[in-house]
Image (cartoon, rainbow, N blue to C red):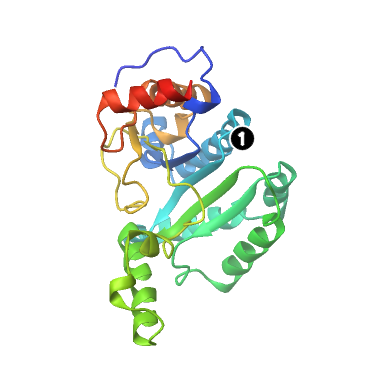
């Protein structure tokens, strides 16, 4: 992907309200650096901290990070155990209080059924502490899968139908959407994937329907503020049509000018 300078500031209207990121490349980065164990994932946590700070600085309303997919449980048990330990460290109250002090609201989406009691308690305390914050909404997708999300929403609606509180004919896109994760947030405008792979890997399948996709070869631990600014500059150059013709969009924009 060709990269250009992102020195010129985008207007707030050209910034995405909601950014979703697939943080890929930790293990490859580790191998390139000659490291071992969880060194790549630790570097990835620092990249997440940088990105959270930069998104808050740029005035992004919502940031969703794909931290651990429902498929990641299939990885070697030693790596999974290490990742859970890192997750627990991220949820240490000192770290969470820094997020809280920056007026960021912290949320988690996913099944949570595989997390131990200690981790679940830390998640609950973090969400409770930051629930009243009015700044950026930071969502961590952990033990999450897009197919699970849609199936879970369908199950909730099926139970409503079974109980006689809802008719099948009443189910439409808006109602199903209201039962998906993060339904109270604007849908992602921009999805960034690092590491050179060009797929979304079962991430926010419903929510990303009209998101702009940005793929970079940069491995996640190397992703920094400059890389984020490049993605934002690329987004600002795109015309989002949502099924309309370019001429229609341009006429609407001129009418709002």
Quarter assignment of residue 143: bottom left
Residue 202 location, x and y as percent?
30, 53
Q: Tag 1's secondary structure?
A: helix
Q: Which residue is mark 1?
A: 56
- Where is the N terminus found, in terms of image quarters? top left
For the point 44% across and 21% down, which residue is it?
233
x, y (%) of residue 178? Answer: 43, 62
State the residue at coordinates (48%, 68%). 112
Residue 207 can be seen in this image:
yes
Residue depicted at x 30% and y 61%: 147
Q: Is residue 41 left or right of residue 91?
A: left
The image position of residue 172, as x and y in percent, is 32, 64
Task: Give the answer, above or below, for where 174 lies relative to 220.
Answer: below
| Residue 90 percent location from the top left of the image | 60, 51
Q: Residue at x 33, y 54 (%)?
A: 206
Mark 1, Cα crowd under 10 Å, few <14 / some 14-19 / many 20+, is some
């Amino acid at each position: 992907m060709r990269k250009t300078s992102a020195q010129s500031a985008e207007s707030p209207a050209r910034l995405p309200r909601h950014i979703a990121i697939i943080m890929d490349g930790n293990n490859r980065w580790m191998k390139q650096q000659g490291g071992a164990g969880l060194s790549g994932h630790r570097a990835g946590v620092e990249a997440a901290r940088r990105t959270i700070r930069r998104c808050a600085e740029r005035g992004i309303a919502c940031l969703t990070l794909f931290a651990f997919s429902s498929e990641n449980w299939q990885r070697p048990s030693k790596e999974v155990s290490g990742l859970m330990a890192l997750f627990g460290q991220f949820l240490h109250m000192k770290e969470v209080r820094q997020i809280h002090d920056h007026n960021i609201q912290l949320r988690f989406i996913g099944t949570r059924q595989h997390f131990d009691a200690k981790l679940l308690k830390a998640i609950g305390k973090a969400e409770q502490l930051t629930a009243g914050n009015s700044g950026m909404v930071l969502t961590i997708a952990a033990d999450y899968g897009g197919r699970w999300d849609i199936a879970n929403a369908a199950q909730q609606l099926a139970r409503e139908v079974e109980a006689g509180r809802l008719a099948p004919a009443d189910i439409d896109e808006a109602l199903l959407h209201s039962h998906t994760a993060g339904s109270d947030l604007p849908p992602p405008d921009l999805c960034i994937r690092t590491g050179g792979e060009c797929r979304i890997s079962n991430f926010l399948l419903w929510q990303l329907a009209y998101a702009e996709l940005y793929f970079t070869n940069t491995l996640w631990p190397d992703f920094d503020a400059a890389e984020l600014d490049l993605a934002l500059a690329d987004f600002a150059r795109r015309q989002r049509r949502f099924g309309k013709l370019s001429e229609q969009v341009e006429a609407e924009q001129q009418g709002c000018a």
